Image: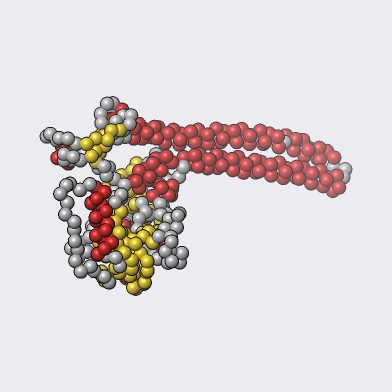
Amino acid sequence: RFVITSWPMELAFPGYDHPLTVVEVSRAVRELLEGVFSRVSVQGEVTGFKRSANGHIYFALTEADPSGGTARLDCVVWRSSRIAAKLDLSDGESVIATGRMSAWSGSSRYQLVVEKVELAGRGDLLRRLEETRRRLLQEGLFDPSRKRTLPYLPRRIGVVTSVHGAAVRDIVRTILGRWPAQILVADARVQGEGAAAEVAAGIEALNRIPDIDVIIIGRGGGALEDLFAFNEEVLVRAVAASRVPVVSAVGHEVDHVLTDDAADARAPTPTAAGNLVVPSMVEVAQLLDALADRMSAALSRRVEAGFQRLDDLHARLSGAGKQALGGHRHRLEMLQARLRAAHPMRRLEEARRTEEALRARLMAVGRRLLERPRALLGQMELKLSALSPHAPLERGYALALTRDGRIIRRHDEVARGDQIDVLLGAGSLACDVTDTRP
């Protein structure tokens, strides 16, 4: 919703009898915007509010587009502005920002240079979020008693996220670096229209696979609308209905979504989720060593206590014999001979042999427990090396990418004049497409 407070009566464009340069076009667009929208008030929902190290403030105003998607207007508050020092907005707040439009020629972008901000009430996204939270809370989906304990040593781990994002690489690298588990990834969009339904379908698909021990859902950080798929009711209910424990790992530490409340456990980041679901092999080895030490110490204490009781009994018998039996020396000597035959040193030797046998068995069990994980880890490393996208490059192949990072698989995915990057085994080439052939 735009409230235009000034509008020029007419726009005059100078005539040009020669092709315009990029600088000329950029300057003309900027002058046009700053002339037409020299002062404009725009209402929308705040998203991505942040204050840079140099004091400037950046955020965006968003609004649902009736034709689908979301309209977005980037905004900036320069540190020299009188409102910069005290301005503090939260994602989802509905505000009216007043200022002037300007364009930046460096990236063909336009933005609103904000001079005044007024609150206009709670935004639609926050209102939807609170309504969904209240309804699901009343149904008991967030009840702590529903949460299950994660398995200590999972063998098969399911992950629902986009295979094109950094989150899946962080999760896989963290898990395989700590424990040789099998990882199954269900690809799903994590942002935009239909993302919540895709993640929910991924959870249901992994639930149908036998022996899945735990499921991780997640993505990297972003603005409120970027993460909103994980607040959608269809996804929250899928998390709550999962027969397999679910870990929600969405965004960063400061981000919170409804799947965090419905899941069995929350991880602040995708990397933290990898650390949460599997132990470290080093920690397991240390635990086995500690258990062996505790068993040995307990056995030693029991043996020492037996020796002490025998010594006490010997002392009591000797004292009682001297005081009570008096002249019955012969009987006392017989008792002493029997005690010497059952000297505690014999029991100590037997206990020591038992302790040594137990220690050897513990060490052998520990080695056997670690042999298979080490072998599996080696196999995983070989498989990951073979699946690395850089492996073909080392053999002389090349990988063509668009400037926004998409892989070019067909000639009709680019056109003459496009700029592409070609990755080689060592280095890369920046190329212009002069022709395409099928």
Q: Position of residue 23 (x, y in %)?
A: 26, 49
x 42%, y 66%: residue: 83
x 24%, y 47%: residue: 22
Given residues 228 and 369, the one toward you in this image is: 228
Direction from residue 365 to residue 176 in the image, left or right: left
x 30%, y 67%: residue: 39
Given residues 431 and 143, the one toward you in this image is: 431
Q: Position of residue 87 (x, y in %)?
A: 43, 66
Residue 98 to residue 291: above or below:
below
Q: Position of residue 50 (x, y in %)?
A: 40, 58
Quadrant of the image for the C terminus? top left
Q: Does residue 79 appear in the picture of this structure?
A: yes
Residue 369 falls in which quadrant of the image? top left
Quadrant of the image for the N terminus? bottom left
Farthest residue toward the left? 438
x 42%, y 36%: residue: 373
Given residues 67 and 385, the one toward you in this image is: 67
Direction from residue 28 to residue 327 in the image, left or right: right
Residue 131 falls in which quadrant of the image? bottom left
Residue 335 falls in which quadrant of the image? top right
Direction from residue 264 to residue 106 in the image, left or right: left
Farthest residue toward the top? 395
Q: Does residue 235 appear in the picture of this structure?
A: no
Residue 360 to residue 216: above or below:
above
Farthest residue toward the bottom? 121
